[in-house]
């Protein structure tokens, strides 16, 4: 038995760089495991009736990060959920510690080459990417990879369909 309850009860936290598919994978994983799915960014957007870029613009990043931390810490105390974290959430030590202690943290990994193909589809909704050069984006990608090293399980999605990634997670967790 793991600390703070059994593995079957623990919430699952999906971490990884923005645009790697945490929400899409999380929804499918939650459906297969018959758990509630929570997208942290979406929940904050609903609360403020604004998009993340609008929240960044209107209130600032510090405000957003504080709200994000409060929500994730509260969610970390709940059981049997699948929770998708925003790409920058795990940068906060308090969030990292709460997720690692209370849940199962799964790192959704993707190569920079594969991720770069997604930029045209995600750039407008990611304030952190605005105005950055290719080199700056790659540096951010690599810096965050270091932060994501703290996890319980890693799944690489390059070339995989969503179902393949979800099945790999379930097989690794042995929760099905």
Image: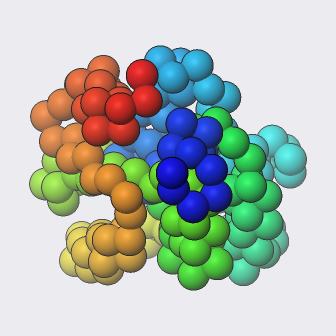
The structure residue drawn at horizontal position 69% and vertical position 42%, both measured from the top left corner, is: 79
At which x and y percent is residue 116? 22, 53
Q: Is residue 10 left or right of residue 75?
A: left
Say if 40 sits above or below 169 in the image: below
Residue pictured at 32% horizontal, 71% vertical? 149
- The x and y percentages for residue 100 are 52, 65
Relative vertical location of residue 74 with respect to residue 164 in this rendering, above or below:
below
Above or below, comparing residue 1 to residue 67 in the picture: above
Of 83 and 116, nearer the camera is 83
Q: Residue furthest front?
A: 1
Task: Check the image and tell me how it is coloured.
Answer: rainbow
Q: How many numbered discs sit on the rendered protein?
A: 0
From where the camera sits, is residue 47 visible?
yes
Residue 56, given in percent of the width and then of the height, sits at 70, 67
Residue 23 at x, y = what percent? 50, 38
Residue under the point 35% across and 32% down: 174
Which quadrant would residue 161 be assigned to in this image? top left
Classify residue 3 by image quadrant: bottom right
Looking at the rendered image, the quarter that the C terminus falls into is top left
- The residue at 62%/26% (across/down) is 35
Q: Is residue 40 left or right of residue 87?
A: right
> Does residue 84 show up?
no
Front residue of this view, candidates 28 and 152: 152
Left or right: residue 127 compared with residue 129? right
């Amino acid at each position: 038995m793991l600390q703070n309850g059994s593995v079957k009860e623990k919430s699952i936290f999906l971490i990884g760089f923005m645009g790697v598919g945490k929400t899409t994978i999380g929804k499918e994983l939650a459906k297969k495991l018959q758990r509630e799915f929570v997208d942290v960014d979406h929940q904050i957007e609903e609360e403020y009736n604004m998009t993340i870029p609008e929240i960044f613009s209107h209130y600032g990043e510090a405000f957003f990060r504080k709200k994000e931390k409060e929500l994730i810490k509260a969610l970390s105390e709940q059981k049997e959920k699948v929770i998708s974290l925003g790409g920058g959430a795990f940068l906060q030590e308090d969030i990292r510690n709460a997720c690692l202690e209370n849940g199962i943290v799964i790192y959704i990994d993707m190569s920079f080459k594969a991720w770069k193909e997604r930029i045209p589809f995600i750039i407008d909704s990611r304030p952190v990417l605005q105005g950055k050069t290719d080199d700056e984006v790659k540096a951010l990608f690599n810096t965050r990879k270091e932060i994501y090293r703290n996890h319980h399980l890693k799944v690489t999605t390059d070339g995989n369909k969503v179902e393949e990634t979800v099945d790999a997670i379930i097989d690794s967790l042995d929760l099905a």
